[in-house]
Image (cartoon, rainbow, N blue to C red):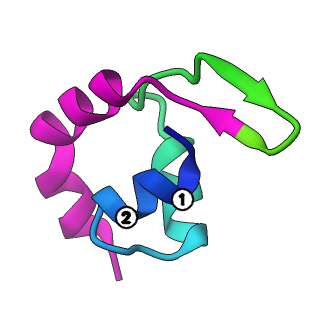
Amino acid sequence: MGAHEIRLRLGGVSRQRAYQITSRADFPAPVADLAQGKVWLTEDVEAWMKVHRRDVDDTEG
């Protein structure tokens, strides 16, 4: 999944907010860095969201 799909899964956050989240040390590492951007495994992102979604919501704003 790319950054756009991550943004949608996080409730339509901005590109800047998605970048902040995907840059966190505890966010899963991308499996590839393509010309169009980084790509993450869907299951890794979903597992991360189950644990950290509240942290993401609390720091948004």
Residue wearing tag 2: 8
The number of discs equals 2
| Marks 1 & 2, CB-CB < 8 Å contact | yes
Q: Determine whether, in the image, residue 10 is placed left or right of residue 52.
A: right
Mark 2, other Cα within 10 Å: few <14 / some 14–19 / many ≥20 = few
Which of 32 and 17 lies nearest the eye of the viewer?
32
Residue 54 percent location from the top left of the image: 12, 56
* Magenta stretch: dominant secondary structure: helix
Q: Residue furthest top?
A: 31
Residue 28 percent location from the top left of the image: 43, 24
Q: Determine whether, in the image, residue 13 is placed left or right of residue 47.
A: right
Badge 2 amino acid: Leu
Write the residue at 54% across / 59% down: 4
Which of 42 and 55 lies nearest the eye of the viewer?
42
Mark 1, other Cα within 10 Å: few <14 / some 14–19 / many ≥20 = some
Residue 59 percent location from the top left of the image: 29, 67
Q: Please say if 24 is above or below 55.
A: above
Residue wearing tag 1: 4
Badge 1 amino acid: His
The residue range painted magenta reads 38-61
Q: Which disc, if any, is residue 23?
A: none
